[in-house]
Image (cartoon, helix red, strand yellow):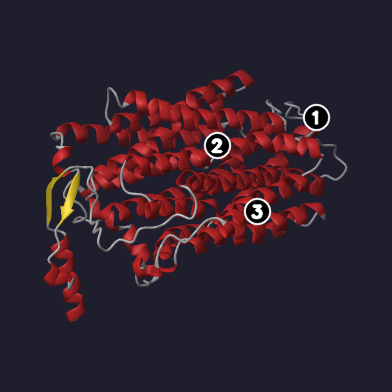
Amino acid sequence: MQSIGNEDNRNRMISKVTYDQSEKQPLLVNKDNCEDIKLRYPRWLTFSILISIPFLHMLSYILSLYVIGQYTYVYFLEEKFPGVPHSLSGSLSVCNVNKSSFAYFIESSIQQTSAKWAIYTNLAFIIPSVLININLATYSDVHGRKLFFIVPLAGSIIKNILCAVGMYYKMNVRLMLIFYMIEACTGSWVATLSMSFCFVADTTTPGKGRSLIISLLDGGVGLGAIGASLLSGYLITWTNGYHYPEFMAVIIAIIPFLCVLTMVQETLPISRRRSNVSILQNIQRVFDCYRSNFSPFGKQWVFVVLIITFAMSALTVLSRASVDSLYFVSAPFCWSSITIGLYTGIRTVLWNIGGVILIIVLQICTTDEVISLVGCITTTATLIIQGLAKTNLMMYIAAVSSIGCIVTMPMIRAIMSRMTPPEKQGSIFAGVAAVESFSSLFGTVIIGIIYDSTVTIYRGLTFLIWSGIGGIGIILSLILIMENRKRPAVNQTSRSNIVIKVDSSVTGE
């Protein structure tokens, strides 16, 4: 009981803060106690290698995702309707909009089966991956960074090898659920990106340099997704099959794995590692921001509204990939795998690069809350256009209108960070990351169920229903704007960086 009391006293002393430092000064930095990390290679080479690791991991992950998705479509077609001709595009050779035709019946049946399969695979991925990615970054503070670079890359390599072998021998596709779980239990590309951020935090000081490297890491992940979406269709067509593109995903994942083993050094000295804590304690920290005493800068209900808005955006933007592919290969579009890859690549470029440009422009004349609203509006409009689309032109209009879809999530992060005391920034970002992972994966399952239930009624109905979620985000963003206008602007300089004064008699230092 005495130790608990001492811990409470320490927490109370840490909470006594003085808002008189400029934003450029780091928090809780004691230069006498911090060890300098001597990089093995020049900084430009070290960070070039670091940026390439999540880029290549994402490239491998998305390439495998597209290849397995299209292979699954053909597998179920051959299983349920043997002898029916098909192309490597993953769609029937006869793409007929006549609902009374046998081809239309076959296509609808395979669409429903593939949608159900997407639900099962995402369920196999959702539970272990969310738990792993909530705790993995925290446990790297205990066991070091390098181990948690190796584990997710190894998991992806094993999963891709097993899937490629399974495709070659025409293994029952249902057994791939086990392969998905292997990758999920090792964290996948999300864990690799988290470790990259930790590496940057270990080897740089707070400031513009660190921010630039973090931005390049995020951009690299986006480029990996774009490259994979463009590459998948061509590889399937050129190799006249699916197992060779999947082996290509293996090779791509092996490259960063070897880089980690041979070139990435451990950046967390033993003297700076903290004591171990339980999984339950880690999970509890994720939800600290929704408690009434979390922050003096924002109301509890505002945090709740912000995280719900973030979840709505993650649901509408990040959970559509599997259903989009099924939608594109069906009538009236009948797109090939190459066309799907090109379209997805164009849209991803607009989301990432266009979104960043949009944020830069809008920040000149408006607030983060308004930019969040713009993101919700563009997302809702895009989903409505896609749901009503009957021609390729309408689909490309939907792609162009989606330029602001991605901006809501970074703006919500910025708002929540602004409302959070500096000593609690880690817990706020952990909580947001957990919601992002859960919303993306859970949303993929739900949208698959909706598509399976409505594909025979109206193929675009799923996107019209999904646009309702975007509408909820619009309403919540309007509430945030009104709340922001009711209170006077906070003096950012006076609270931007907080010096945390700790009584050495309490901490024992």
Residue designated by label 1: 94
Q: Earlier in the sequence, mark 1 or mark 2?
A: 1
Distance in Å between CA atoms under marks 3 and 2: 18 Å
Q: Which mark is residue 127?
A: none
Circle 2: residue type: Leu
- Where residue 156 sits, quadrant-wise, is bottom right
Q: Secondary structure at mark 1?
A: loop
Foreground: 375 or 1? 1
Specify whether residue 174 is in view: no
Q: Is residue 442 left or right of residue 138?
A: right
Q: Is residue 301 left or right of residue 470?
A: left
Residues at marks 1 and 2 touching, judged by CB atoms closer than 8 Å: no
Instruction: Residue at 31%, 47% (x, y): give it.
Output: 206
The spot of residue 228 in percent (x, y) is: 63, 39
Distance in Å between CA atoms under marks 1 and 3: 39 Å
Residue designated by label 2: 223
Circle 1 residues within 10 Å: few <14, some 14–19, many ≥20: some
Instruction: Residue at 62%, 54% (x, y): give it.
Output: 121
Circle 2 residues within 10 Å: few <14, some 14–19, many ≥20: many
Quadrant that contains the C terminus: bottom left
